[in-house]
Amino acid sequence: MIPLFLDLGKSRRTLLFGICFALLFTSIGYLAIYPSFEDQLQGIAEDMPDAYKAFIGDADLTSPEGYVRSQVYSLVAPLLIAGLTITAGASLARAERDQTLVVLATSPLSRSQLAGAWWLYVGALGLVGGLMTVIGVFIGGPLAGAEISFGAVILATLPMLMFGVLVGTVTLFASAQTGAPGTASAIGWVAVLVSFLANSLAELIESLSWLSNVNPWSWHGAGEAVTGDFDLSGFLLLVLATAVVGVLAIARFARRDLHL
Amino acid sequence: MATAAITSTNLTYEYAPGVGAVGLDLEVPSGQVYGFLGPNGAGKSTAIRMLTSLIRPQSGSVSVLGLDPWRDAPRLHERVGVLLSDQPAPRHHTGYSLIELLAKLRKRPEVVHQAGRLAERLELDLAKRGHELSLGNRQKLGLVTALSHEPELVILDEPTNGLDPLLQREIGLVLREIADQGRTVLLSSHSLNDVEAVADHVGFIRNAVLVEQLPLATLADRAVRRVRFRFAQAGINAESFASIANVEQVTVASDGEVSVQYSGAVGELLSRAGELGAVTIEAHPVELEETFLALYRGDDHRPGTGGSR
C-alpha cells in the first residue's frame, strides 16, 4: 500500500504544485498589501452592515490578526486546500474512468488497501496545503503587522487542513460510490459551498443557529486560534467525521463493481 | 482430462436482460491455452471481469485456481496475470516505473528483470511514458505487466489488438511456451485466426451465452473445410456434389472450377470427384471462422461437449 501511496504523489503533480504555490504566494500577497490600505479598511469595516460581516466570516478586519483570519483562514487557504484534497479524492474515480486502475485492481493489493492508499494521499495533500498555509502566514503575518506566534499559526491551521481532508474524503467516498470523477469533484465542492453558506446563515438567522453545531466549516473555526482559543472539540469533530466518511469510502469501494 | 484452472457454474452478470454473460459453465483445463471466442459484445469481457474480481457475479459460482475471485482477490492476483481489452498505460508512468511499482506491490523485485527480457523480446521501449505509446506498444506493455511475474494463469482479453502479424505470431509463441511450462492461458478474441494457432481448447460465446466448448482437435473434426477441384471438362453439375450428406455448399465457376465446402469425412467427396474426372484438387486450411459461423448459424442454443444453455 505504501508504494502505491508514494506513487500517487507523482500523478497530476503539475496541477498540485500549482495549487501549492498559489496557496503560498496568495497568502503572502494578501497579507503583504494589508498595510497599504489598513486605514481605508477600518473605515469600510465601520460602515459595513453586521449581517454582511457575519456573512463573510465575522472577522475583525480592523486588526492585522483579524485580517489574517478573514483573508487566509476564511478564504484562500480553505478553498485551495480543498482544491488539493478534492483533486486527490476524485483521482480514484479518474483512474477508474480512464481505465488505468486496471493494473492496480488486478495486483495483489486488496480493494481496501487501494482505497486506503488514496485516502492517505488525500490526507498527505491536506498536510501539504496546511504546511503551505503555515509558511505563508509565518512569512506574510509580519508583513501585515500581525503578531502571531508560531504555535498559534499551527493551531489555527490544523483544524482548517482537517476541514480540507474531510471534504477530500467526502470526494473520495463519492469516487468510491460512483466511479465518476466529475460527479465526485462536484460533490466535494458542493460540500465546501454548502458548509460555508450554512456557517454564514447560522450567524445571521437565529432559528438556524443550530447549524453551527453540525457544520464542518463552523468546526474548523476559520483560524480562531490566531485571535482566540483553539477549539479542540471542533477539531476532534472534524477528525471523527473524516474517519467515519473514510471508512465508509473504503467499505464502499471494496464492494462495488469496477467498470474497467 | 487435466484438472481445471477455471470452473464456473451458471455464472451470470447481466447489465440488461441478455446483455453481459448468462449461465456460463466454463471449464478451462490447466496447462492449456483456452481460446475464448465470440463476436464483439458477446459477453467475453464481462466473463473475464468476473474471473478477475472486477465485478461480482450476480448468480452462479466460479473457482479460479481453486479460489473465489471475489472473496480471495489479493491471493488470486498473486497467481494470475491479466490484460484487459484496450488497456491503457498510466500517463505519468514509464514502462520501467510501472513495472517497478508492480514489482514492489507484488514484493517480487526479480519481476523487473523478467519484464526487461520480455520487453526486449517484444521490442518494447520501456523508457517511454504511457501517453507516448502507440496502441500496439500499450498492448505490449500490458502483456509485459501481465506476464512478467510468471503467473500460473494468464487471462488476456484481445491481446493482439493493434499488433502487426509478426508480433501476433511472437505473442502466440510466448503463450505456447507458457502452456508448455504447465501454466494456463485464457485467451479471449473475436478473431478465430488469433486463437487457431495457439489454442488447445476453445469455447464459443454468443449473445451472453456459452454456446459450446470443446478441444480444438474435436473442433477440427467438425470444422468446415473447403476444397477446389478442376475438371478436364466443363459442365459439372453442382448437384453432383450437393447430394453428398456432409457437403454444405457447392460453387461452380464459369471456368469449370468447383469449390466445395464440407465438414467431416472426405472419402465420399473424393470418390465423387474422381468419378467426375477431377484433374487437380486444392485443399484450403481449416476455416475456423466458417466453423464458428456454422455453429452459430440460426440457432441460439446448440448442445455440445460441455456447452451451457
Image (tube, coloured by chain):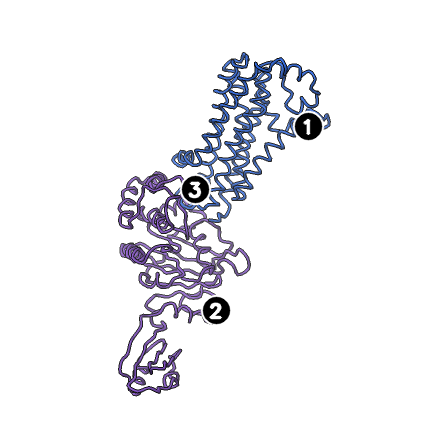
Chain colours: A blue, B purple
Q: Is residue A117 above or below residue A77?
A: below
Determine the secondary structure under disc 3: loop
Chain letter of disc 1 in the image: A
- Residue receiving disc 1: A201
Chain letter of disc 3 in the image: A
* Quadrant of the rendering where the N terminus of chain B is positioned: bottom left
Asked if badges 3 and 2 are on one and the same chain, I answer no
Determine the secondary structure under disc 1: helix
- Residue receiving disc 3: A110
Q: Residue B17, how many percent across, how many down?
A: 55, 60
Q: Amino acid at mark 2?
A: His
Asked if badges 3 and 1 are on one and the same chain, I answer yes
The answer to whether B185 appears left or right of B207 in the picture is left
Looking at the image, which residue is at 44% across and 39% down? A114
Asked if marks 1 and 2 touch (Cβ < 8 Å), the reply is no
Task: Give the label, 3 or 1, closer to the camera.
Answer: 1
Is residue B246 or residue A204 the one in the foreground? A204
Q: How would you rate the neighbour count of disc 2 (Cα within 10 Å): few for under 14, some for 14-19, many for 20 or more?
A: some
Q: Is residue A76 visible?
A: yes
Looking at the image, which residue is at 54% across and 14% down? A144
Asked if marks 3 and 1 touch (Cβ < 8 Å), the reply is no
Q: How would you rate the neighbour count of disc 1 (Cα within 10 Å): few for under 14, some for 14-19, many for 20 or more?
A: some
Q: Is residue A244 above or below residue A62?
A: below
Q: Residue B253, how many percent across, how many down?
A: 36, 80
Chain letter of disc 2 in the image: B
- Residue receiving disc 2: B301
Is residue A217 or residue A142 the one in the foreground? A142
